[in-house]
Image: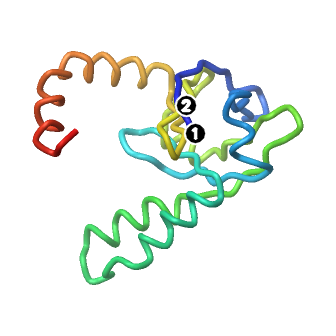
Amino acid sequence: MFIGEYQASIDEKGRVAIPAKFRPQLKAKVVVTRGLDNSLFLYNLDEWKKLADKLASLPISTANTRAFSRLMLAGAMDCEIDKQGRIIIPGYLKDFAKIQKRVVVAGLYNRIEIWSEELWAAYKTQTEQQSNAIAEQLGSLGV
């Protein structure tokens, strides 16, 4: 399980260090793809296969299904973790997530999200301001 929030920097070669706490669950290869809210989603191979299988089983006759599948699957890139625990984030994914130099790496149970530090700060502030309304909606779902 991935939990926690960590700050990191992108080096001149486009590499970002994955927090040491997360590395044992990732092994040598991961998949990074476009996420939601201008973040990137990072999955270990087992979790990626589960998600990809679910997306592949959805009906292609629905426009939203096609769009979401394209976002997640066509935007995906498999990445090797080097000996220092870093991955290279491809340029098109850095552009999508508006990543410049500083990032936040956040653990979200079965995936890791990588955010531009600025976008993460703005998202977190907005979400914190709406936390009561969000809690009420989740309460109706049994959370």
Residue 85, image x, y percentages: 79, 34
Q: Residue furthest front?
A: 142
Residue 123, image x, y percentages: 33, 24
Residue 11: image quadrant is: top right
83 displayed left or right of 46: right
Asked whether the residues under the numbered discs 1 and 2 touch, taking CB atoms below 8 Å apart as contact, a structural biologist would say yes
Residue at x 67% of width, y 34% of height: 22
Residue at x 18% of width, y 38% of height: 138
Q: Could you tell which of marks 1 and 2 lies nearer the N-terminus?
A: 1
Q: Is residue 61 above or below residue 15?
A: below
Q: Is residue 46 above or below residue 94?
A: below
Question: In the rendered image, which quarter contains the N terminus?
Answer: top right
Give SS at disc 2.
loop
Question: In the rendered image, which quarter contains the C terminus?
Answer: top left
Q: Which residue is mark 2?
A: 99
Residue 32, image x, y percentages: 60, 50
Q: Amino acid at mark 2?
A: Ile
Residue 100: image quadrant is: top right
Q: Is residue 56 above or below residue 67?
A: below
Give SS at disc 1.
helix
> Mark number for residue 94?
1
Q: Amino acid at mark 1?
A: Lys
Residue at x 80% of width, y 50% of height: 28
57 displayed left or right of 115: left
CA gap, disc 1 and disc 2: 5 Å
Q: How is the image coloured?
A: rainbow
Mark 1 packing: few (<14 Cα in 10 Å), some, or many (20+)?
A: many
Residue at x 54% of width, y 24% of height: 104
**How many numbered marks appear?**
2
108 displayed left or right of 9: left
> Mark number for residue 136?
none
Mark 2 packing: few (<14 Cα in 10 Å), some, or many (20+)?
A: many
